[in-house]
């Protein structure tokens, strides 16, 4: 059974803090994705990675960066957290780089920035 | 530009009645279409997908979806709703260019099944 785990379910940070969200998958997948989920907006892609040290911007990369030093781990970094980054963050990983598109999701991290 | 529309924020249905959650898409080329479900405080779970072949696809938990190319729709259906089906449902389409299995999601529809 594929497992995608995220380091925290709930996180509260202050404005201006540097925030790290971690995602780990245990099935040797090449692709990993970070989305944010907001009511009425669905899921929006922040960044994705298609291999170690390889990354590409998604639709809303501003204010975020990512790191992928090992294949199983994909980190999302909020360089200086702001209140408009309060959201649910979801990590996902598809089983194949160029497959049909099905993705496995982690449980999500609900981040509140005060 | 590729997009997915879910025209209803919420769908209410009585237990035992049939349910439909609507989705329309706009994408060039042949779409790969998906439905995902999110139960409270959980991540998204894959329900079903259409890639090619029969326009009616069956998925998990008794759900099915009908692909209609002329209407560019992919509505989710279930013949008899359960209270446990209450959740947030997302339609998604795979971006046809750029590879890497990128998905474009709709805004989501909250399904409420009442006893």
Image (cartoon, coloured by chain):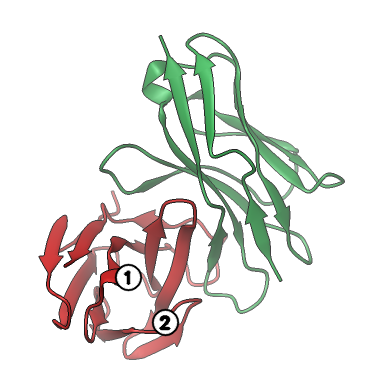
Chain colours: A red, B green
Task: Determine the CA span between mark 1 and mark 2.
Answer: 13 Å
Give x and y (percent) for residue B6: 62, 45
Question: Pointer 1: what residue?
Answer: A84
Question: How many C-alpha atoms fall within 10 Å of the one at disc 1: few (<14), some, or many (≥20)?
Answer: few
Question: Pointer 2: what residue?
Answer: A61
- One can see residue B26 in this view: yes
**Which one is nearer the viewer's eye here, B49 or A18?**
A18
On residue A72, the disc is none
Q: Is residue A52 above or below residue B49?
A: below
Give x and y (percent) for residue A15: 17, 77
**Which one is nearer the viewer's eye here, A52 or A77?**
A77
On what subunit does the disc labeled 1 rest? Answer: A
* Residue B111 relative to residue A13: left or right: right
Badge 1 marks a residue whose secondary structure is helix
Q: Is residue B73 above or below residue B28?
A: above
Q: Is residue A23 above or below residue B53?
A: below
Question: Which quarter of the figure is the C terminus of chain B placed in?
Answer: top left
Question: Which quarter of the figure is the N terminus of chain B placed in?
Answer: bottom right
Badge 2 marks a residue whose secondary structure is loop
**Which one is nearer the viewer's eye here, A48 or A30?**
A48
Residue at image position (66%, 76%) is B97
Question: How many C-alpha atoms fall within 10 Å of the one at disc 2: few (<14), some, or many (≥20)?
Answer: some
Residue at image position (37%, 83%) is A51
Residue at image position (40%, 73%) is A31
- Outermost residue, bottom side: A53
Give x and y (percent) for residue A114: 16, 67
Give x and y (percent) for residue A42: 48, 55
* Residue A83 relative to residue B105: left or right: left
Q: On the image, which quarter does residue B32 sit in?
A: bottom right
- One can see residue A8 in this view: no
Tag in front: 1 or 2: 1
Q: Is residue B112 above or below residue A54?
A: above
């Amino acid at each position: 059974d594929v497992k995608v785990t995220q380091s925290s379910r709930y996180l509260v940070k202050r404005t201006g803090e540097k925030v790290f969200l971690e995602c780990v998958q245990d099935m040797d997948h090449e692709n990993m994705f970070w989305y944010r989920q907001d009511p009425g907006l669905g899921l929006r892609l922040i960044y994705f990675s298609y291999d170690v040290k390889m990354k590409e911007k998604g639709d809303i990369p501003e204010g975020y960066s990512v790191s992928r030093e090992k294949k199983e781990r994909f980190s999302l970094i909020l360089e200086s957290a702001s209140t408009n980054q309060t959201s649910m963050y979801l990590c996902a990983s598809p089983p194949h780089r160029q497959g049909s598109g099905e993705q496995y999701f982690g449980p999500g991290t609900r981040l509140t920035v005060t | 530009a590729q997009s997915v529309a879910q025209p209803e924020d919420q769908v209410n249905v009585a237990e035992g009645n049939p349910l439909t959650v609507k989705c329309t898409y706009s994408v060039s080329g042949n779409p790969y279409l998906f439905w995902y479900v999110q139960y409270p405080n959980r991540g998204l779970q894959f329900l079903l997908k259409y890639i090619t072949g029969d326009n009616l696809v069956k998925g998990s938990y008794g759900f099915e979806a009908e692909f209609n190319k002329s209407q560019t729709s992919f509505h989710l259906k279930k013949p008899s709703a359960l209270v446990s089906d209450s959740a947030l449902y997302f339609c998604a389409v795979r971006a046809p260019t750029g590879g890497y299995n990128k998905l474009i999601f709709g805004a989501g529809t909250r399904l409420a099944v009442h006893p």
